Amino acid sequence: MYESGEDYLEAILVIKNKKGSVRSVDIAKHLGFSKPSVSRAMSILEKDGYIEFGIGNMINLTSKGQEKAEDIYERHQLLTKFLVKITGVSEDQAEENACRVEHVIDSDIVQGIKRFMSKNK
């Protein structure tokens, strides 16, 4: 999956957790993208089995989409906390960097960071 697809799934999860439901316009606003761009991405995510549309075009994560979104969001949160802890940068700066790194980091590195963070609370 491409980085942009991961960003969309993460956005859907975050919006759903905040608002309880997700529409394309919510995603566009959250990510700062145009509605046509979001619409195209949603078509691709639906075709790939990550989302489905419900009543009133509400966007729902499938079980595959939910699993992927939670994994991305967990990496994002972990990396943000890790960067704040080891570098002392602001949470905003750490979050911006975590957002870029979360898409390319190897899973064994993520596991190592998890171990480090649990030992160094």
Image: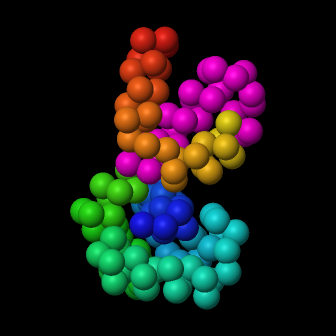
Q: To which quarter of the image does residue 107 belong?
A: top left
Residue drawn at x 50%, y 80% as measured from the top left: 41
Q: Is residue 107 magenta?
A: no
Q: Position of residue 35 (x, y in %)?
A: 62, 83
Q: Position of residue 22 (x, y in %)?
A: 47, 69
Q: In the image, 53: left or right of 9?
A: left
Residue drawn at x 49%, y 11% as measured from the top left: 120
Q: In the image, 97: left or right of 49?
A: right
Quick one: quadrant of the N terminus? bottom left
Residue drawn at x 50%, y 34% as measured from the top left: 78
| Pick the front one: 13 or 100 | 100
Give the main secondary structure of the magenta stretch: helix
Q: Position of residue 56 (x, y in %)?
A: 40, 85
- Boundaries of the magenta span: 71-93
Q: Position of residue 93 (x, y in %)?
A: 74, 39
Whether residue 12 is visible? no
**Image: 7 above or below 76:** below
**Image: 83 above or below 85:** below
Q: Residue placed farthest to the left in the image?
A: 63
